[in-house]
Amino acid sequence: QNVGAGGTIILPRQAPAVDASTRRTAEEYPAIQGSSDRRFRARVTGVDGGELPLRCRPPRERADDEFARLGLFDAAVIKVYINARGDPINHKFYKKAKSTKILVTVEGINTFPLEIPFINYDELNYGGAKDVKTVKL
C-alpha cells in the first residue's frame, strides 16, 4: 500500500524468492517461473481478492514489465507460487520462511528492495505473535 509517496509506486514484474536461511545455511525458495501452465503464473489482485482497480493497472505497453502502479492510498496483492523443495506438506516452509524481497520504483526515479517479513509459524499457531510489522513506503 502506498501511504506516503507523493507520486506513483511501480511494482516491476519480477520473481520474488522467500528467504529460508538458518545460521548455518543460506537457502531460498524461488517462485515458479517459465511454466506454460497458466495456474502457476504470478497474479496481482486487489486487497479484497477481486480484480485490480483500473487506476492501478499498468498501461498496455508496460503490462509485460510491471505488476501494478500504486497511487496514494492504493494497494495491491501479488500472488506467486513458491517452489519449496523437499517439503510435501509445507511444514518446513512455514517454519523456515522469514521474509521476501521485492523491488519497487518510487516516482519512476528511485528503485530499491522492499523486505516483507512473515509471521513465524509457531507464533501463529500458539498465539505468541506480539509484534506484527507493517511495511510503509
Image: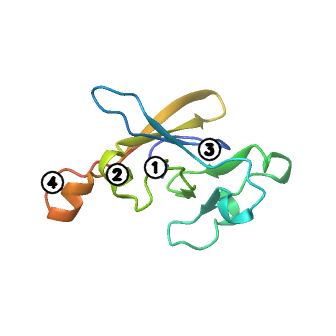
Sequence-wise, the earlier of marks 4 and 3 is 3
Residue in view at x 34 percent, y 42 percent: 98
- Assign a secondary structure to mark 3: strand
Q: Are marks 3 and 2 in contact (CB under 8 Å)?
A: no
Circle number at residue 92: 2
Which residue does the image show at 68% across and 65% down from the upper left?
39
Mark-to-mark CA distance, 3 and 2: 29 Å
Residue 130 - label = 4
**Of marks 4 and 3, the one in the foreground:** 4
Q: Is residue 27 above or below residue 87?
A: above
Point out the tag, 3 or 1, that comes first from the N-terminus: 3
Asked if disc 4 and disc 3 are in contact, CB closer than 8 Å, the reply is no
Location of residue 35 in the rendering, given as x and y in whole percent from the top left corner: 73, 53
Q: Real-space Cα distance between discs 4 and 1?
A: 31 Å
Q: Tell whether label 1 touches label 2 (CB within 8 Å).
A: yes
The outermost residue toward the right is: 61
- The numbered dot on residue 86 is 1
Which element is circle 1 on? Answer: loop
Camera sees residue 137: no
Residue 12 located left or right of residue 37: left
Percent x, y for residue 118? 34, 49
Q: Disc 3 residue type?
A: Leu
Crowd tier of the residue under label 4, counting other residues whose Cα lies within 10 Å: few below 14, some 14–19, many 20 or above: few
Q: Secondary structure at mark 2?
A: helix
Please state which of the two labelled residues, at mark 2 or mark 1, is closer to the viewer. 1
- Work out whether residue 108 or residue 87 is closer to the camera in this orientation and state it: 87
Residue at point 40%, 58% (across, down): 90
Give the alpha-carbon distance from disc 4 to disc 3, as whole Å. Answer: 30 Å
**Amino acid type at image mark 2:** Lys
Say which residue label 3 marks: 11
**Whether label 4 touches label 2, CB < 8 Å:** no
